Image (cartoon, rainbow, N blue to C red):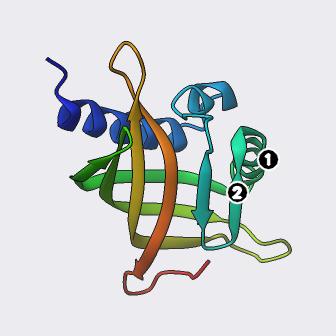
Amino acid sequence: MLDKTKATEALAKRWYAALDTHEPTQTLVDMLDPTDLKMVFPEATLSGVEGFIGWYEGVIRIFFDEVHKVESVTLGAEKDGRIQTKVAVHWEASRWNPPAAKSDRILLTAFQTWEVTFNETGEAKVAKYTVDKLEYLPNSAKL
């Protein structure tokens, strides 16, 4: 029997590991459910895989020295084959805004709601990804 909690936790860890190392775009696309994909970030709302690709290929040119640490993954109710999941992740990243003499460091916890689906092999996929709230740590740069 499929353990949806473990599959969803594994997805979150794979997702953030891929973001940390700026994996090829297709690696992240493979973790998405393209059916009605919607992603809501503080700076943009994206629809579909093409929207994600444009966003991802932009942010990997802005942020570096990234560290994501999954703090919690909590599964909620399942409806229409989707499980609403609360994810909390600690994120650190550097960013350089030319012509600044130095980069700045972002330190925060992001609270998100994901909708997760499962393919025919039981692999978890992100169908909806919403950043609900950002809590900045002391001395953090702001987005």
Q: Position of residue 107 (x, y in %)?
A: 44, 72
Identify the residue shown where x is 37% and y is 87%: 138
In this view, the residue farthest toward the front is 80
Q: Which residue is mark 1?
A: 54
Which image quadrant for residue 133? bottom left
Locate residue 135 relative to residue 131 in the image: left or right: left
Left or right for 75, reference 37: left
Please say if the residues under marks 1 and 2 sit with CB atoms less than 8 Å apart: yes
Identify the image quadrant of the N terminus: top left
**Residue situated in front as seen by the camera: 88 or 102:** 88
Identify the element where label 2 is drawn.
strand
As measured in the structure, the alpha-carbon distance from the residue carrying label 1 to the one carrying label 2 is 9 Å
Residue sitting at x 78%, y 77%: 100
| Position of residue 57 measured from the top left corner of the image (x, y, whole percent) | 76, 44
Disc marking residue 4: none
Mark 1 falls on what kind of element?
helix
Q: Position of residue 30 (x, y in %)?
A: 57, 25
Residue 46 numbered tag: 2
Say what amino acid the circle numbered 1 marks: Gly
